[in-house]
Amino acid sequence: MNYSLTQESILNAAENLIQKRGYNAFSYKDIAATVGIKTSSIHYHYPCKEDLAIAVINWQLQRIVIGLDKIKGQKELTTKHKILALIDVIVSLTFGDEKKMCLGGMLASDALSLPESLQSKVRYFFNTLYNWIEEIMTEGKQLGEVNLLYPIDNFAHLLILQIEGALLMSRLYGDITHINLVKQFINHVMN
């Protein structure tokens, strides 16, 4: 999808606020102040906060999928290195210098107060990641690169749980030690 400069600015600001504060801790007024526009301009593009959050998820997923497709297309990478590259993609969109959380993780933490359509979109966000991991792991199994003692779908869920937990703890402690522990785990359980 093509976005106007105003839409990109709104989406950037909203994404940043959600990843730092959560869905319930920002308003259109916060975005307007960040972007330098009136709240009515935000409402023009995104009539309600739910619409904006869904657009932010779609926008970030677009970038994630581009990154994951690039990784998948690199035939010289082993399955293990593709999984490690996935972690790097997630970290690049989250922790970085600003110590932001995963967009999906922050929205999931607000799940009890989210509209159903937004909850559904957050589940779709995570299912996209699960499915990609399962696909990469299945290909790796066929190539003899994967030999797990438990089902691949369980591994996909466990990996995302580990990444989400590592981002949370890395944010708390202010460093990437916990993220590196997830990478060490991958190095130990995969060929």
Image: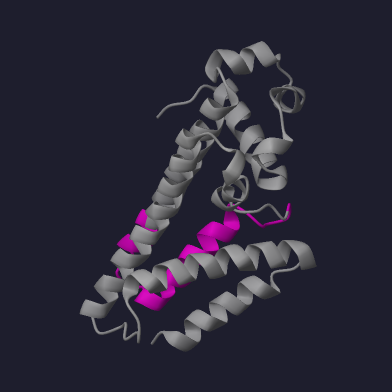
Q: Is 63 or 22 nearer to us in this picture? A: 22
Q: Is residue 125 left or right of residue 131?
A: right
Q: Is 4 or 189 nearer to us in this picture? A: 189
Where is the C terminus found, in terms of image quarters?
bottom left
Secondary structure mostly seen in magenta is helix
Q: Is 25 or 17 nearer to us in this picture? A: 25
In the picture shown, does residue 14 fall above or below 184?
above
Q: Is residue 107 left or right of residue 127?
A: right
Residue 80 sits inside the magenta stretch: yes
- In the rendered image, residue 84, in percent from the top left (x then y), is placed at 48, 71
Where is the N terminus found, in terms of image quarters?
top left
Q: Is residue 59 visible?
A: no
Q: Is 9 or 100 nearer to us in this picture? A: 100
- Residue drawn at (40%, 74%), measured in percent from left and top? 155
- Residue drawn at (54%, 20%), measured in percent from left and top? 46
- Residue drawn at (35%, 60%), measured in percent from left and top? 132
In the picture shown, does residue 89 fall above or below 140?
above
* Total residue callouts: 0
Please report the bounds of the magenta region as a residue range: 69-98
Kindly indicate the quadrant of the structure image that contains residue 134.
Answer: bottom left
Q: Is residue 41 left or right of residue 46?
A: right
